[in-house]
Image (spheres, rainbow, N blue to C red):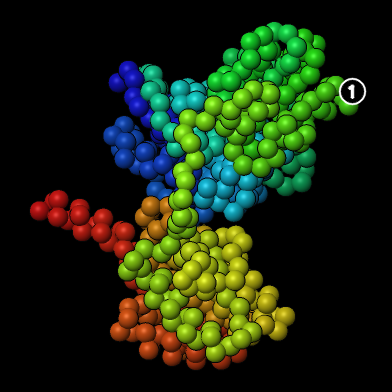
């Protein structure tokens, strides 16, 4: 099984976790992290070993299930994109207080430049906030190797470990040298009850113990082979994670370089670099996480530059060109920019059921000049773009229903929420319960395409259960409708939307039709099996 494989960064993380003795991966799909779980789901070793790999309802449930597997003594992996860290934060931060038994590694895939996201959040702050170690691989080989380190570190320190990636690393390929897989941990549930029951008395002791571990976390970071210092003269550079590659590509001769792939930030190495340099440039993809800390370590009198000072761009991804500019070097673009190329914004697939939903909704909404339509996270968010321009807001998972409720509370009429099936089970059910409990005058369109379409067609947690869920949450039977969004049903759908908009309470309309992409994929599989 040893040798070389050509792997995405995500795939290298997945294989590294499997070879580290993984027993379960817990995740909600989200670009750029999705391929980690998909790789494990399809891997023969994972099937042979019975590695648990079904998708979770959201990132919080994923984190909690992984913590349960760790409690039982086995190694567990949690995967998510950066905004998923917001969803799992309660469990993640408290896992630092309880500690772990079996190794527990959380992979957060950040998305600088917002290729498929609504913000440029930097997950390293969560590791610092939770007082747990953070690892940040710089290339695909490190993605593979660092997983064994992470699980070992987790068990030695009895803490969860956060592994932070970025889109360019997650979705680019390189040859990776792989080794033999380690055995899985045996079942060994923890019997130390006071660690896990976070009543205030226990939690105070556990938090004090977590704080007492911080010098050891720092010592390990300062002696880690993942952090390396090469001294030169003049300018000193601190390069974090993937930015190390950009620096190496354009690095002037004689410059001192500190590579960072393990946190807390190694203060001793930073001070050694500063002593040998006239100034320090901090190069990191994301927010100025390390730069702020370097300034604090060295004091206001030492010149430190980076994203905060404008020497590097404050937003967006780094690349060799803008890193070269920071060194005062000429850019060497590989490809000239395309000329006379018209922009082509993304759009809903031809034949998509969401198209029919927006066509019907727009027809009715046009009759109400003060109407507002609150959208949510999913491929249906493309309804905000031409030709539909059908939604007015899109903020975070599940926000459509509660924002519509708040707007209705303020007097907006009609207030319509559009939410997808997977987003509804992820974060929308509690929002609907709030609306039902307050008898809010809103109309919810729960657009069900029988899959998690935006991230590639993964299972949706509530498929074939949405009508029952809405009824159980208190939606009245006569104001719950399931329709099929096709052209011949357009008159019926517009009639239902118009009637429910006038109802002074919560109504739910479920347009239900399979995603065109998953339908096509299923038909191809059927044909291939014949």
Q: Quadrant of the N terminus?
A: top left
Indicate left or right for 256 with 27 as reference. right
Quarter holding residue 175:
top left
Instruction: Name the residue furthest left.
Output: 530
Near-viewer residue (393 or 456): 393
Q: Compared to 273, does 373 lie above or below?
A: below
Q: Residue 350: x and y, percent?
A: 34, 66
- The residue singled out by tag 1 in the image is 301
Please tell me how many numbered marks the rendered image carries.
1
Q: Residue at x 10, y 53 (%)?
A: 530
Indicate the secondary structure of the residue bearing disc 1.
loop
Indicate left or right for 317 with 425 as reference. right
Query: Is residue 111 in view?
Result: yes
Q: Compared to 94, does 465 lie above or below?
A: below
Q: Residue at x 32, y 69 (%)?
A: 351
Q: Residue 147: x and y, percent?
A: 49, 27
Query: Is residue 71 in view?
Result: no
Q: Residue at x 60, y 60 (%)?
A: 396
CA neighbours of label 1 inside 10 A, class few (<14), some (14 to 19), many (20+): few
Q: Residue 472: x and y, percent?
A: 49, 75
Quarter holding residue 18:
top left
Indicate left or right for 146 with 437 as reference. left
Q: Compared to 306, does 123 lie above or below?
A: below
Q: Compared to 326, does 62 lie above or below?
A: below
Q: Residue at x 49, y 76 (%)?
A: 445
Q: Residue 58: x and y, percent?
A: 52, 54
Instruction: Name the residue furthest front.
Output: 340
């Amino acid at each position: 099984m040893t040798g070389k494989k050509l792997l995405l960064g995500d795939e290298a993380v997945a294989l590294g976790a499997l070879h580290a003795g993984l027993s379960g991966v817990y995740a909600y799909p989200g670009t750029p992290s999705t391929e980690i779980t998909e790789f494990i789901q399809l891997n023969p070793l994972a099937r042979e070993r019975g590695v648990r790999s079904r998708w979770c309802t959201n990132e919080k449930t994923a984190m909690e299930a992984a913590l349960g597997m760790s409690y039982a003594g086995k190694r567990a992996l949690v995967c998510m994109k950066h905004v998923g860290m917001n969803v799992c934060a309660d469990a993640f931060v408290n896992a630092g207080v309880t500690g772990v038994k079996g190794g527990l590694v959380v992979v957060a895939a950040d998305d600088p430049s917002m290729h498929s996201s609504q913000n440029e959040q930097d997950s390293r702050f969560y590791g610092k906030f939770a007082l747990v170690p953070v690892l940040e691989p710089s290339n695909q080989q490190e993605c593979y190797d660092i997983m064994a380190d992470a699980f070992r570190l987790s068990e030695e320190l009895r803490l969860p470990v956060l592994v932070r990636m970025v889109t360019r690393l997650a979705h680019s390929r390189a040859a990776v040298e792989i080794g033999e897989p380690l055995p899985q941990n045996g079942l060994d549930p923890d019997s130390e009850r006071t660690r896990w029951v976070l009543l205030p008395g226990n939690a105070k002791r556990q938090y004090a113990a977590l704080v007492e571990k911080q010098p050891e976390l720092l010592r390990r970071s300062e002696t880690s082979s993942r952090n390396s210092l090469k001294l030169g003269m003049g300018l000193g550079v601190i390069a974090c994670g993937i930015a190390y590659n950009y620096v190496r590509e354009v690095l002037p001769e004689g410059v001192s370089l500190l590579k960072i792939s393990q946190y807390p930030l190694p203060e001793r190495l930073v001070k050694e670099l500063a002593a040998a340099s006239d100034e320090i440039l901090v190069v990191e993809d994301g927010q100025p996480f390390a730069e702020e800390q370097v300034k604090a370590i060295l004091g206001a009198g030492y010149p430190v530059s980076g994203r905060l000072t404008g020497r590097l761009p404050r937003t967006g991804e780094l690349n060799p060109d803008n890193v070269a500019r920071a060194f005062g070097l000429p850019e060497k673009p590989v490809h000239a920019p395309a000329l006379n190329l018209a922009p082509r914004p993304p759009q809903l697939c031809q034949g998509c059921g969401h198209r029919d939903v927006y066509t019907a909704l727009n027809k009715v909404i046009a009759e109400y000049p003060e109407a507002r339509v609150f959208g949510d996270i999913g491929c249906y968010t493309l309804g905000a773009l031409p030709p539909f321009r059908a939604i007015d807001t899109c903020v975070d998972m599940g926000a459509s229903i509660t924002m519509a409720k708040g707007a209705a509370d303020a007097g907006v009429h009609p207030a319509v929420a559009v939410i997808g099936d997977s987003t509804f089970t992820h974060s929308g059910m509690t929002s609907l319960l709030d609306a039902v409990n307050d008898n809010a005058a809103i109309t919810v369109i729960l657009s069900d395409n029988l899959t998690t379409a935006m991230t590639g067609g993964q299972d949706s947690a509530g498929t074939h259960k949405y009508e029952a869920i809405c009824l159980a949450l208190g939606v009245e039977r006569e104001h719950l409708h399931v329709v099929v969004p096709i052209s011949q049903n357009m008159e019926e759908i517009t009639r239902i939307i118009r009637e429910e908009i006038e109802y002074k309470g919560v109504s739910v309309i479920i347009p239900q039709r399979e995603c065109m992409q998953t339908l096509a994929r299923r038909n191809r599989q059927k044909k291939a099996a014949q």
